[in-house]
Image (tube, rainbow, N blue to C red):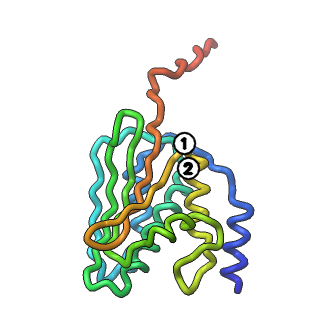
Amino acid sequence: MRTLVDEFWQFSRFPAAQPVPSDLNAIVGNAMAVFQDRLRGIRVRERLAPDLPLVNVDPEQFKRVIVNLVDNAAEAMQDSPIKDLLVATSVSDVETVELAISDTGCGISREDRERLFLPYFSTKGRGTGLGLAIVNRILTEHNAVIRVEDNLPSGARFIIELPVRPAIAAEAPPAEIRV
Protein backbone atom coordinates (compact mmCIF):
# COMPACT_ATOMS: atom_id res chain seq x y z
CA MET A 1 0.00 0.00 0.00
CA ARG A 2 2.87 2.38 0.83
CA THR A 3 4.41 1.87 -2.63
CA LEU A 4 1.07 2.67 -4.24
CA VAL A 5 0.70 5.88 -2.23
CA ASP A 6 4.31 6.86 -3.03
CA GLU A 7 3.71 6.36 -6.77
CA PHE A 8 0.56 8.51 -6.70
CA TRP A 9 2.37 11.21 -4.73
CA GLN A 10 5.33 11.23 -7.11
CA PHE A 11 3.07 11.50 -10.12
CA SER A 12 1.02 14.38 -8.73
CA ARG A 13 3.99 16.35 -7.34
CA PHE A 14 6.60 15.50 -9.92
CA PRO A 15 9.36 18.15 -9.88
CA ALA A 16 9.92 20.36 -12.90
CA ALA A 17 12.82 19.33 -15.12
CA GLN A 18 16.17 21.07 -14.56
CA PRO A 19 17.80 20.52 -17.97
CA VAL A 20 21.56 20.90 -18.40
CA PRO A 21 23.85 20.03 -21.33
CA SER A 22 24.23 16.25 -21.01
CA ASP A 23 25.84 13.23 -22.62
CA LEU A 24 23.01 10.80 -23.39
CA ASN A 25 25.41 7.84 -23.50
CA ALA A 26 26.59 8.63 -19.95
CA ILE A 27 22.97 8.78 -18.75
CA VAL A 28 22.31 5.39 -20.38
CA GLY A 29 25.38 3.99 -18.57
CA ASN A 30 24.16 5.32 -15.21
CA ALA A 31 20.69 3.91 -15.80
CA MET A 32 21.97 0.48 -16.81
CA ALA A 33 24.18 0.37 -13.69
CA VAL A 34 20.94 0.24 -11.66
CA PHE A 35 20.30 -3.21 -13.15
CA GLN A 36 23.64 -4.77 -12.25
CA ASP A 37 22.86 -8.40 -11.34
CA ARG A 38 19.11 -7.78 -11.83
CA LEU A 39 18.82 -8.85 -15.47
CA ARG A 40 19.98 -12.44 -15.09
CA GLY A 41 18.99 -14.67 -17.95
CA ILE A 42 18.61 -11.69 -20.30
CA ARG A 43 21.19 -10.96 -22.98
CA VAL A 44 21.78 -7.21 -22.62
CA ARG A 45 23.46 -5.30 -25.42
CA GLU A 46 24.30 -1.62 -25.56
CA ARG A 47 24.95 -0.04 -28.95
CA LEU A 48 25.86 3.55 -28.13
CA ALA A 49 26.79 5.87 -30.98
CA PRO A 50 30.16 7.55 -30.50
CA ASP A 51 30.37 11.35 -30.51
CA LEU A 52 26.68 11.98 -29.84
CA PRO A 53 25.91 15.70 -29.64
CA LEU A 54 24.91 16.97 -26.21
CA VAL A 55 21.23 17.16 -25.30
CA ASN A 56 19.53 19.46 -22.80
CA VAL A 57 17.99 17.11 -20.25
CA ASP A 58 17.57 16.68 -16.55
CA PRO A 59 19.95 13.71 -16.10
CA GLU A 60 18.09 12.21 -13.12
CA GLN A 61 14.70 12.44 -14.78
CA PHE A 62 16.02 11.01 -18.02
CA LYS A 63 17.70 8.20 -16.11
CA ARG A 64 14.28 7.44 -14.64
CA VAL A 65 12.83 7.20 -18.17
CA ILE A 66 15.46 4.64 -19.16
CA VAL A 67 15.13 2.63 -15.94
CA ASN A 68 11.36 2.47 -16.32
CA LEU A 69 11.54 1.32 -19.95
CA VAL A 70 14.25 -1.29 -19.26
CA ASP A 71 12.32 -2.59 -16.23
CA ASN A 72 9.16 -2.92 -18.34
CA ALA A 73 11.12 -4.68 -21.09
CA ALA A 74 12.59 -7.17 -18.61
CA GLU A 75 9.14 -7.92 -17.22
CA ALA A 76 7.70 -8.37 -20.73
CA MET A 77 10.34 -11.05 -21.42
CA GLN A 78 9.62 -13.11 -18.30
CA ASP A 79 7.99 -15.95 -20.24
CA SER A 80 9.90 -15.54 -23.51
CA PRO A 81 12.16 -18.36 -24.65
CA ILE A 82 14.62 -15.82 -26.08
CA LYS A 83 15.44 -12.86 -23.83
CA ASP A 84 17.30 -10.12 -25.67
CA LEU A 85 17.41 -6.47 -24.61
CA LEU A 86 19.04 -3.81 -26.78
CA VAL A 87 19.62 -0.22 -25.65
CA ALA A 88 20.90 1.92 -28.52
CA THR A 89 21.63 5.57 -29.22
CA SER A 90 22.06 7.16 -32.63
CA VAL A 91 22.03 10.46 -34.46
CA SER A 92 18.92 10.57 -36.63
CA ASP A 93 19.64 13.97 -38.16
CA VAL A 94 21.51 17.17 -37.28
CA GLU A 95 18.76 18.23 -34.87
CA THR A 96 17.75 14.93 -33.28
CA VAL A 97 19.25 11.98 -31.44
CA GLU A 98 17.42 8.73 -30.78
CA LEU A 99 17.36 6.36 -27.87
CA ALA A 100 15.84 2.94 -28.61
CA ILE A 101 15.03 0.20 -26.12
CA SER A 102 14.07 -3.09 -27.76
CA ASP A 103 13.03 -6.40 -26.23
CA THR A 104 11.96 -9.86 -27.35
CA GLY A 105 9.00 -10.03 -24.99
CA CYS A 106 5.28 -10.45 -25.57
CA GLY A 107 4.89 -7.20 -27.52
CA ILE A 108 2.12 -4.60 -27.27
CA SER A 109 -1.19 -4.84 -29.08
CA ARG A 110 -2.35 -2.00 -31.32
CA GLU A 111 -5.27 -1.33 -28.96
CA ASP A 112 -2.99 -1.06 -25.94
CA ARG A 113 -0.60 1.30 -27.77
CA GLU A 114 -3.38 3.88 -27.91
CA ARG A 115 -3.65 3.98 -24.10
CA LEU A 116 -0.12 2.99 -23.09
CA PHE A 117 0.93 6.41 -21.77
CA LEU A 118 -2.32 7.28 -20.01
CA PRO A 119 -2.28 7.45 -16.19
CA TYR A 120 -3.52 4.29 -14.46
CA PHE A 121 -3.45 2.14 -17.62
CA SER A 122 -1.54 -1.11 -17.22
CA THR A 123 -1.26 -4.37 -19.12
CA LYS A 124 0.19 -6.02 -16.00
CA GLY A 125 -1.71 -7.59 -13.18
CA ARG A 126 0.15 -5.44 -10.68
CA GLY A 127 1.47 -1.89 -10.39
CA THR A 128 -0.21 1.48 -10.53
CA GLY A 129 -0.20 2.17 -14.25
CA LEU A 130 1.80 5.35 -13.67
CA GLY A 131 5.25 4.32 -14.92
CA LEU A 132 4.71 5.11 -18.60
CA ALA A 133 2.58 8.16 -17.75
CA ILE A 134 5.58 9.52 -15.81
CA VAL A 135 7.85 8.67 -18.76
CA ASN A 136 5.51 10.59 -21.06
CA ARG A 137 5.42 13.60 -18.73
CA ILE A 138 9.23 13.72 -18.50
CA LEU A 139 9.61 13.44 -22.27
CA THR A 140 7.05 16.18 -22.86
CA GLU A 141 8.99 18.51 -20.56
CA HIS A 142 12.12 17.78 -22.62
CA ASN A 143 10.42 18.39 -26.00
CA ALA A 144 11.02 14.75 -26.82
CA VAL A 145 8.65 12.29 -28.45
CA ILE A 146 8.27 8.56 -27.99
CA ARG A 147 6.86 5.98 -30.32
CA VAL A 148 6.27 2.26 -29.95
CA GLU A 149 6.89 -0.26 -32.70
CA ASP A 150 6.89 -4.01 -33.07
CA ASN A 151 10.33 -5.56 -32.64
CA LEU A 152 10.16 -8.32 -35.22
CA PRO A 153 9.97 -11.24 -34.88
CA SER A 154 8.74 -10.61 -31.34
CA GLY A 155 8.66 -7.93 -28.71
CA ALA A 156 8.46 -4.16 -28.63
CA ARG A 157 10.73 -1.24 -29.42
CA PHE A 158 10.39 2.14 -27.69
CA ILE A 159 12.08 4.93 -29.63
CA ILE A 160 12.65 8.35 -28.09
CA GLU A 161 13.52 11.27 -30.35
CA LEU A 162 15.28 14.05 -28.47
CA PRO A 163 16.35 17.46 -29.79
CA VAL A 164 20.08 18.15 -29.91
CA ARG A 165 21.34 21.00 -27.75
CA PRO A 166 21.83 24.17 -29.83
CA ALA A 167 25.44 24.86 -30.78
CA ILE A 168 27.48 26.73 -28.18
CA ALA A 169 28.84 29.06 -30.89
CA ALA A 170 25.40 30.65 -31.12
CA GLU A 171 25.55 31.70 -27.47
CA ALA A 172 26.85 35.07 -26.36
CA PRO A 173 30.42 35.09 -24.98
CA PRO A 174 30.80 35.71 -21.25
CA ALA A 175 31.11 39.33 -20.18
CA GLU A 176 34.64 40.67 -19.62
CA ILE A 177 35.53 41.20 -15.99
CA ARG A 178 37.63 44.27 -15.12
CA VAL A 179 39.45 44.75 -11.85
- Quadrant of the snapshot with the C terminus: top right
Whether the residues at callouts 2 and 1 have beta carbons within 8 Å, the answer is yes
Disc sitting over residue 36 in the figure: none
Taking 3 as reference, is 102 left or right?
left
Q: Residue at x 30, y 65 (%)?
A: 86
Residue 138 at what x, y percent from top left?
Answer: 58, 55
Against 100, residue 21 (above or below) is above
Task: Report the residue marked by disc 1.
Answer: 20
Label 2 amino acid?
A: Asp
Say which mark, if any, is on residue 58: 2
Q: Residue furthest front?
A: 111
Q: Quadrant of residue 10?
A: bottom right
Q: Choose between 158 and 20: the one closer to the eye.
A: 158
- Amino acid type at circle 1 is Val
132 relative position to 179: left or right: left
Q: Nearer the viewer, residue 106 or 128?
A: 106
- Which element type, helix, strand or loop, lies under badge 1? strand
Check disc 2 and report its element: helix, strand or loop.
loop
Measured as percent of width and height from the top left, residue 129 is found at 61, 74
Note whether residue 19 is visible.
yes
Task: Say if 126 sits above or below 131 in the image.
Answer: below
Instruction: Please report the residue visible at 55 percent of the width from the left and 61 percent of the height from the top.
Output: 135
Residue drawn at (39%, 66%), measured in percent from left and top? 32
Residues 172 and 99: in front is 99
At which x and y percent is residue 93?
34, 37
Dividing the image into 4 quarters, which one contains the N terminus? bottom right
